[in-house]
Image (spheres, grey):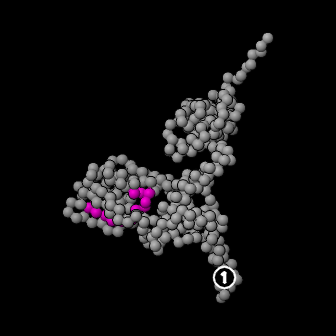
Amino acid sequence: MPQNINQPSNQIRLTNVSLVRLKKGKKRFEIACYKNKVLEYRSGVETDLDNVLQIPSVFLSVSKGQTAPSKDLAKAFGPKTPLNDIIMEILNKGEMQVGEKERHAQLERVHNEVIDIVAGKLVDPKSKRVYTTGMIEKALDQLSSHGGATHKSDEGKASGTATPTNGEASKEASKEKAKEMPTWTGVVTTKSAKSQALEAMKALIAWQPIPVSRARMRLRVTCATNVLKQAAKGSVKKEAEEEDADGESEKSTGTIKDRILSYVEQIESQDTIGQEWEVIGFVEPGAFKGLGEFINGETKGKGRVEVLDMAVTHEGD
């Protein structure tokens, strides 16, 4: 007589998956995603959840096919939280579980992206020329291998006329100063390439394993005077601020003139000739796109941006 095989109703078997785990309310929850799609979703490349999730369910254990009971989800995330919101929270905040090969490939992709970003935004302050990716990579390797202290190791040594007490005090002061300076320990997969590129640039500028300075674009912006005092409609994101860690990603509201000037880091000249206003100044490369989009959208063809120099530096870097 054949025996009935009973399978638990909350068991679902999945294979070839990439797991995202989140611990909440003393329980560990998992979602099953397609390989390589989680990073694409988090970076904004992929926006369709159907292409990311293998199945729109929350699990206690994907490997065992055990879905999370509704009471556990309600206790951890709140009784009125929709399943889709729970999945989104796990997807955005959870820890991604990947194999060794995947992890290595992921690390290499982020590493290359960081190097490309840094190489495009730093220049030699004397020649004003950009460095090759190989030179930037070598400089960052030098920082990570020496803990960021490549060119500061001789600071704090007592001079021939200094007393031992003064020498020790100077050494301690140098150590304290070094602790406050930005450091670089290498690329990780838990942060975005943009945020890590910013950290790398700060460390390179602080420690100078090679002579570097932040690149600036020199621009001329012109606009009809009759639109300058008009109120700017929407808030436009500035890409350079999106990369910054301070979280200020939106431009302040104000007149069109105020908003244009807020993109300019240093004003070289500003003048009004007849019915046209002109400003020449230095702008972060990452802000150029946002500035152009703002002028195109707000001035209705009565404003324009002209690039005068692609990679220049100014005092204060």
Q: Position of residue 257 (x, y in %)?
A: 31, 57
Going by the picture, which residue comes out furthest to the bottom? Answer: 161
Residue at image location 56% in from the left, 41% down from the top: 37
Q: Nearer the viewer, residue 39 or 243?
A: 39
Q: Relative to residue 241, is residue 141 drawn left or right?
A: right
- Would residue 179 be seen by someone viewing this image from the given angle? no
Give 13 or 11, whichever is nearer the viewer: 13
Q: Residue 35 in the image: state x and y as whole percent.
A: 60, 40
Q: Magenta stretch: residue 278 in it? A: yes
310 to the left or right of 222: right
User: In the picture provided, is 299 more to the left or to the right than 79?
Assistant: left
Residue 163: quarter of image:
bottom right
Q: Identify residue for label 1.
A: 158
Q: Specify the farthest residue to the right.
A: 1
Residue 259 placement: quadrant: bottom left
- Indicate the position of residue 266 as horizontal and vertical percent values: 39, 66
Q: Is residue 262 visible?
A: yes
Magenta stretch contains residue 45: no
Query: Callout 1, which amino acid?
Result: Ala
Point 54% across, 62% down: residue:
133
State the residue at coordinates (65%, 44%).
Answer: 98
Q: Which residues are magenta?
A: 277-288
Please name the residue shown 61% across and 42% down the image: 94
Please state the horizontal and vertical placement of residue 236, each as a whole percent of the image.
Answer: 39, 50
Which residue is farthest top?
1
